[in-house]
Image (cartoon, rainbow, N blue to C red):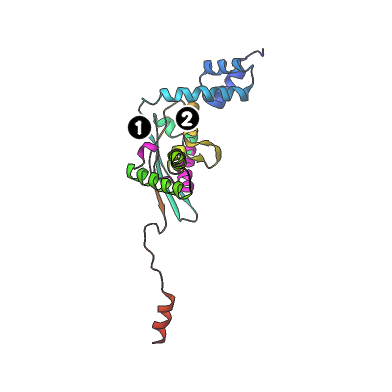
Amino acid sequence: MAQITAAMVKDLRETTGAGMMDCKKALAAVDGDKEKAIDWLREKGMAAAAKKDSRVAAEGACVSYIHAGGKIGVLVEVNCETDFVAKTDDFIDFAKDIAMQIAAANPTCIRREEVDTAAIDHEREVLRQQALNEGKPEKIVEKMVEGRLEKYYKEVCLMEQPFVKDPDKTIEQLVKEKIAKIGEKISIRRFTRYQLGEGIEKKEEDFAAEVMAQIK
């Protein structure tokens, strides 16, 4: 078994932000392999993140992101527990990543609990009719609908979307990793996404009518 030195523990702590004893335990558990120790801490950190849910996160930052030459804009509020953490580059960069995610993936809500029940009922009925129209047997239609609803949640709920910079992890996993590293509760509270021209009913020109008007 590799000898765990104070320098190794210090290096791992600086990389992950985890406690000294946790870093020592992680290195001991994986025979001194730093990369495996990071994974070990992330796994433990994800479990520890749930324990922070009851803590109050009232500090943080409102971060903006402008995309596509000014055609998409996002404003997001991301909270943490202390003003000290809110001012760190690590936290600000994280908030910017969330704003960029919202710009790119266009979620309609943060968590599935926030999805409008009427919208879910409508989506469920549409998916059910789709399955029936495809000739699927009635007995498996409901299972298909629930499966497709899960896909729908992953499209519209921010926390369930694949992270645009690393599609192998969801935004929820990204948040938990950041909680483990920073050591404070982090929550994405609210966001607004603007898209140029969205909601404006554009006039459709009748080319034939326009030509006739010009020759009268």
Q: Can you name the residue that lies furthest to the bottom here?
A: 216
Point out residue 144 in the picture as x, y percentages from the top left corner. 46, 40
Horizontal arrangement in the rendering, residue 14 relative to residue 65 (left or right):
right
Three-letter code for the amino acid on which mark 1 is drawn: Ala
Rendered-image quadrant of the C terminus: bottom left
Q: Which mark is residue 58?
A: 1
Q: Height in image: 183 above or below 2?
A: below
Q: Nearer the viewer, mark 2 or mark 1?
A: 2
Point out residue 29 in the picture as x, y percentages from the top left corner. 59, 16
- Seen at 47% across and 30% down, the residue is 176
- Seen at 42% across and 39% down, the residue is 142
Q: Height in image: 126 above or below 34?
A: below
Q: Are marks 2 and 1 in contact (CB under 8 Å)?
A: no
- Measure the C-alpha gap from mark 2 to mark 1: 18 Å
Q: Height in image: 180 above or below 163?
A: above
Q: Which residue is mark 2?
A: 176
Count of marks placed on residues: 2
Rendered-image quadrant of the N terminus: top right
Residue 149 visible at all: no
Dot 1, how many residues are within 10 Å of its Cα: few (below 14), some (14-19), or many (20+)?
some
Q: Taken as a whole, is the magenta stretch helix, strand or loop?
A: helix
Point out residue 59 in the picture as x, y percentages from the top left corner. 37, 33
Q: Which residues are magenta?
A: 93-114
